[in-house]
Image (cartoon, rainbow, N blue to C red):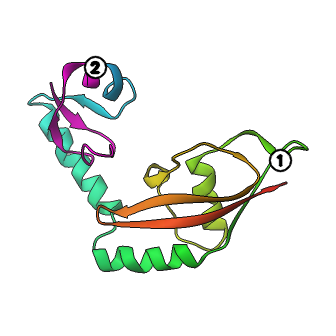
Amino acid sequence: MKLILTQQVSGLGAPGEVVEVKDGYGRNYLIPRGFAMLWSRGAEKQIDSIRKARSAREIASIEQAESIRGDIERLKVRLPSRAGESGRLFGAVTPADIAGAVKAAGGPQLDKRRIEVRNPIKTVGAHSVAVRLHPEVSAKIDLEVVKG
């Protein structure tokens, strides 16, 4: 099945790329979640607009990504969240919450789709979260979730 990616998919590609995947993966996972759309000749025009939008917000060079990584890794990010007496959160910390906490701590504005939370954060304490700044550069955020 030939698809056009509309969002970054780890291990598959970036927005605007045309990829060939198995029918079930495309039909049952990528398309329903909005990660991809069916390829057609008319959709080729949409690829160009997706690429232009991506290049506008994309970190241009590896050097720029390295400097942003340095800024992010120096930050002390604290995220107040509602929690019970045992330290368990009411819900989970989302990538949007993390992006807001980084911005509030004086860091750069991050795209929530670039933040990778491997295991759901559901407890108070210190956690580590990865951010894909560039295809070759990742940063690690030391996040402290506090009861608040």
Give residue 12's position: percent from left, percent from top.
25, 43
Among the 4 quarters of the image, the one containing residue 47 = top left
Pick the quarter of the image with the N terminus. top left
Identify whether 81 is placed above or below 23.
below
Q: Which mark is residue 27?
A: 2
On screen, residue 58 versus residue 121, left or right, reads left
- Residue situated in front as seen by the camera: 92 or 3: 92
Q: Which residue in the protein does label 1 denote?
A: 87
Identify whether 146 is placed above or below 105.
above
Outermost left residue: 41
Give residue 73's position: percent from left, percent from top.
54, 74
Residue at the image position 83 percent from the left and 45 percent from the top: 83
CA gap between label 2 and label 1 equals 40 Å
Q: Count the marks.
A: 2
**Residue stretch rendered in magenta on the structure:** 1-27
Identify whether 58 is placed above or below 84.
below
For the residue marked with disc 2, what is the amino acid? Arg
Q: Which one is earlier in the sequence, the residue at label 2 or at label 1?
A: 2
Q: Residues at badges 2 and 1 in contact (C-beta under 8 Å)?
A: no
- Magenta span contains residue 117: no
- Magenta span contains residue 3: yes
